[in-house]
Image: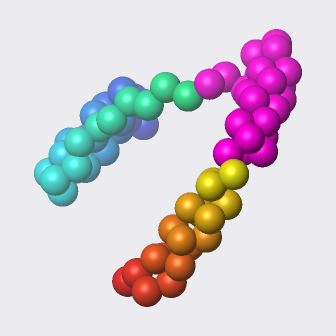
Amino acid sequence: MPTPVSQRVQKRREALRAAGLRPVQIWVPDTRRPGFSAECRRQSALIAKADRLDAELSDFMDAALTDLDDWR
């Protein structure tokens, strides 16, 4: 007789905990929700506008990328 799913899941979780791991629950936006794409476009437009208005942003980003070149 096959092991019930709940028992297999519990066994797997116990093995992961024994390996020093712990479960973490992460909530993310539901990309299937009506209006999601429109909200993404709205927020992207706001960010693009803010970027255009920030004259020092490009210099800051270039400096940050230069710092990453030597990062290990």
The answer to whether any part of residue 42 appears in the image is: yes
Span of residues in magenta: 29-54
Q: Main secondary structure of the magenta part?
A: helix
Q: Position of residue 21 (x, y in %)?
A: 22, 49
Q: Position of residue 18 (x, y in %)?
A: 14, 51
Q: Does the stretch in magenta take in 10?
A: no
Q: Quadrant of the N terminus?
A: top left
Q: Position of residue 9 (x, y in %)?
A: 35, 36
At x 55% / y 28%, what residue is drawn?
Answer: 28
At x 23% / y 42%, what residue is drawn?
Answer: 22
> Of 41 and 47, which appears nearest the observer?
47
> What colour-coding does the image apply?
rainbow
Q: Quadrant of the C terminus?
A: bottom left
At x 30% / y 44%, what residue is drawn?
Answer: 12
12 over 27 or under it: above or below: below
> Of 64 and 55, which appears nearest the observer?
55
The answer to whether any part of residue 40 appears in the image is: no
31 over 54 or under it: above or below: above
- Is 24 positioned to the left or the right of 50 in the image? left
- Is 38 positioned to the left or the right of 63 in the image? right
Q: Position of residue 47 (x, y in %)?
A: 72, 36
Q: Does the stretch in magenta take in 47?
A: yes
72 over 39 or under it: above or below: below
- Is 65 positioned to the left or the right of 55 in the image? left
Query: Residue 43 sits in which quadrant?
Result: top right
